[in-house]
């Protein structure tokens, strides 16, 4: 059987991305349906999560599926020494799809290779976060009315931030110019810069983070410094407050520029910005529901046509 897992966004063509966005749009129109009636979705979260797990579970619930799983690996047989392989094989007996977040890079790939059911990567270490990217793309399209030829500024922890890694790979189809703003210790890894050069993605690195630098942004994508990935917490302390977005830094921003953040925010966006027209991170998080409804349907083999012609919609 074809493996329908979503492990990395790099596997998706431009057409496939646009197809999933069109499906997400259908779910924004009608999020409540029974199209997944009788299906069981397992959410296995080996790392903390609020939005990703709750939006996947809401996505499943609003489509009529049922959800099993855990939010805390401490309550599982992993603490008795069960391996990831055995956990995945067991859960595959119970569920039609596995949504998994794991602290090890490559864990989702591994799970997808052994599981007889599709696996959706809900974040693997500092590596990839493809479902976040689908909601980011949906949000970028919603606010800019296009995905092509945008200036996208990535700010903060570009080393450990898996959301920026996935976004960068997905945007290769849309001729972006990326602007990287990060402390030296957290700069975009060489492997991703190499990827940009190979794929013809333009990028500029900035040291300053001020009104002048961000004046050219269509999208300002802020990120949190990923404390849990540091081996040296002194280093975290040194870099954690380096790039903070303040309201007065927006005075030269394009009117249609939007600030995104995968959340959780720690302190990198001043609260006063929440009421500014450029702020869009809470609407972005809402889009997670629709993007994840599309992802769940797609990995379960439900097509866009079926979603469009679906007669299970609940008013
Ligand atoms: C992100 C993640 O888990 O990578 N959160 C999320 O899923 N929205 C970003 C983060 O934790 O900083």
Image (cartoon, grey):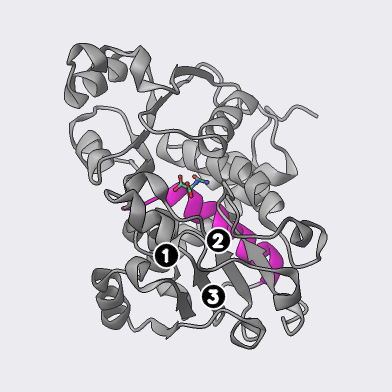
Q: How far apart are the alpha carbons under marks 3 and 2?
A: 12 Å
Identify the secondary structure beneath mark 3.
Answer: strand
Left or right: residue 140 compared with residue 241: right
Assess whether mark 2 and mark 1 are in contact (beta carbons under 8 angstroms).
yes
Identify the secondary structure beneath mark 1.
Answer: helix
Assess whether mark 2 and mark 3 are in contact (beta carbons under 8 angstroms).
no
Q: Which mark is residue 22?
A: none
Q: Which mark is residue 152?
A: 3
In the rendered image, is residue 102 in sight?
yes
Answer above or below: position of 308 versus 145: above
Which quadrant of the figure contains the N terminus? top left
Which residue sits at x=19%, y=37%? 113
Answer above or below: position of 189 versus 125: below
In the rendered image, is residue 20 in sight?
no
First in sequence: mark 3 or mark 2?
2
Percent position of residue 304, x then y: 55, 46
Left or right: residue 115 compared with residue 298: left
First in sequence: mark 1 or mark 2?
2
Q: Which residue is mark 2?
A: 137
Q: Which residue is mark 1?
A: 170
């Amino acid at each position: 059987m074809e493996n329908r897992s979503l492990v990395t966004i790099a596997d998706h063509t431009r057409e496939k991305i646009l197809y999933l966005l069109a499906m997400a749009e259908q779910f924004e129109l009608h999020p409540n349906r029974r199209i997944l009636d009788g299906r069981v979705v397992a959410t296995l979260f080996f790392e903390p999560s609020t939005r990703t797990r709750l939006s996947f579970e809401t996505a499943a619930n609003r489509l009529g599926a049922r959800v099993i799983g855990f939010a805390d690996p401490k309550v599982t047989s992993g603490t008795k020494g069960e391996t990831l392989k055995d956990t995945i094989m067991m859960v595959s007996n119970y569920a039609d799809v596995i949504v998994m977040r794991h602290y090890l890079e490559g864990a989702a790939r591994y799970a997808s290779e052994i599981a007889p059911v599709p696996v959706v990567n809900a974040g693997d270490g500092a590596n990839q976060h493809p479902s976040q990217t689908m909601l980011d793309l949906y949000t970028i399209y919603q606010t800019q009315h296009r995905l092509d030829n945008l200036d996208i500024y990535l700010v903060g922890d570009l080393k450990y931030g898996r959301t920026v890694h996935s976004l960068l790979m997905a945007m290769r189809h849309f001729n972006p110019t990326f602007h990287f703003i990060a402390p030296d210790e957290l700069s975009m890894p060489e492997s991703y810069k190499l990827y940009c050069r190979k794929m013809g993605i333009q990028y500029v690195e900035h040291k300053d983070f001020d009104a002048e630098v961000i004046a050219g942004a269509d999208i300002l994508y802020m990120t949190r410094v990923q404390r849990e990935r540091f081996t040296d917490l002194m280093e975290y302390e040194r870099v954690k407050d380096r790039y903070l977005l303040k309201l007065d830094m927006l005075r030269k921003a394009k009117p249609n520029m939007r600030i995104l953040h995968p959340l959780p925010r720690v302190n990198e966006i001043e609260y006063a910005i929440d009421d500014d027209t450029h702020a869009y991170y809470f609407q972005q998080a809402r889009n997670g529901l629709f993007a994840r409804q599309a992802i769940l349907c797609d990995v379960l083999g439900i097509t866009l046509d079926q979603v469009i012609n679906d007669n299970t919609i609940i008013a």
